[in-house]
């Protein structure tokens, strides 16, 4: 996946992404290089802008962590691979957008399995995907439908449940956790993994959602659980990671500009 120092997205993710853009008539838009702040959001246009112009960036941060080509995250990366080796894992992807983080994770694992970099043992994954944008959830569902056959071929059997969720409401977050724990029981999950990625850019979002994030961190703290939180390497992201769940960011500001935070219970 890494030729001449260039990190390439997993082929499965790339193929599904390109097909999704094509079917939605967005391929030309996605080929325009747009700088500036694009954070997604509740409305359709913000969702499409993020999907067209930032989806690859979001997914690449997760791919970089899972592959760890520069050996920056060795211990946590190994624990992550262990968690996803076999058995049943339940993921809660918060502010998931169109799923760049959890789909980036799964497609990278699938590619590693296909290339015999990991053993292909049976792995059942249930994703609870939550976001305020129903448009983003719809795109994520469609991507997963496209990918499921190839994930299955790599021994990864996936179920997914979408929840429209507003992280500024602790009550909604409480309900989200209840539903997720229920799903964990139904799917007999032996590992629980909370995924958060790329939410630091929108100050309003994480400020209004910080109580919810702390709530989730507390709810999983007495379970066999991990929190994988990946942000760009900005000062804002660093402060956010430290404050919200008292995370010690690891990896610092790497050449590729990542922060990876894992809580005290991460991958234990
Ligand atoms: C920058 S995107 C990141 C999406 C995804 N995690 C990724 O890595 O691509 C931020 C996401 O936060 C979502 N969001 C914004 N406000 C929210 C809120 N109050 N509750 C839940 N999600 C929210 C947006 O809809 C958007 O999908």
Image: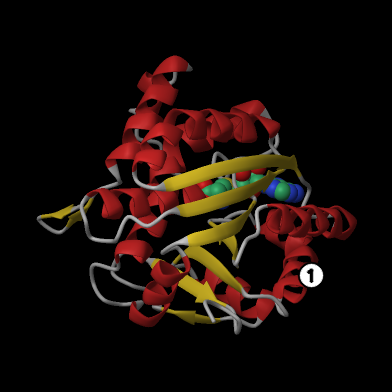
Q: Position of residue 42 (x, y in %)?
A: 70, 36
- Which residue is nearer to you in this view: 131 or 110? 110
In the rendered image, residue 65, in percent from the top left (x then y), is placed at: 37, 65
Mark 1, secondary structure of its residue: helix
Residue at 72% over, 66% down: 213
Residue identified by numbered label 1: 215
Side of 174 relative to 234 (left or right):
right
Q: State the image coordinates of residue 96 (x, y, percent, origin top left).
A: 60, 47
Q: Quadrant of residue 27?
A: top left
What residue is rendered at 52% in x and 77% in y? Answer: 267
In percent of width and height, residue 180 lies at 74, 55
- Mark 1 surroundings within 10 Å by alpha-carbon count, few (fewer than 14), some (14 through 19), many (20 or more): some
Residue at the right extreme, as displayed: 171
Name the quadrant containing residue 92: bottom right
For residue 12, above or below residue 193: above
| Vertical arrangement, residue 246 with respect to residue 171, above or below | below
Q: Is residue 69 visible?
A: yes
């Amino acid at each position: 996946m890494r030729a001449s120092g260039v990190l390439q997205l997993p082929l499965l993710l790339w193929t599904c992404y390109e097909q999704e853009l094509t079917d939605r008539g967005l391929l030309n838009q996605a080929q325009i290089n747009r700088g500036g702040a694009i954070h997604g959001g509740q409305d359709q246009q913000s969702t499409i802008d993020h999907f067209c112009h930032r989806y690859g960036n979001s997914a690449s941060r997760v791919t970089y962590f899972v592959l760890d080509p520069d050996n920056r995250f060795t211990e946590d990366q190994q624990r992550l691979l262990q968690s996803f080796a076999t058995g049943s894992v339940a993921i809660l992807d918060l502010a998931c957008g169109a799923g760049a983080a959890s789909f980036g994770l799964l497609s990278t694992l699938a590619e590693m399995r296909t290339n015999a970099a990991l053993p292909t043992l049976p792995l059942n994954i249930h994703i609870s995907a939550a976001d305020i944008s129903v448009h983003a959830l719809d795109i994520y569902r469609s991507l997963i439908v496209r990918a499921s056959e190839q994930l299955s071929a790599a021994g990864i059997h996936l179920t997914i449940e979408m929840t429209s969720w507003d992280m500024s409401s602790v009550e909604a977050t409480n309900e989200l956790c209840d539903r997720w724990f229920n799903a964990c029981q139904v799917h007999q999950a032996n590992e629980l993994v909370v995924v958060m990625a790329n939410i630091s850019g929108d100050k309003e979002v994480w400020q209004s959602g910080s109580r919810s994030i702390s709530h989730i961190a507390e709810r999983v703290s007495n379970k066999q659980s991990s929190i994988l939180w990946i942000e760009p390497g900005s000062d804002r992201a660093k402060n956010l990671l430290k404050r919200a769940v008292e995370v010690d960011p690891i990896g610092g500001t790497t050449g590729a500009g990542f922060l990876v935070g894992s809580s005290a219970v991460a991958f234990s």
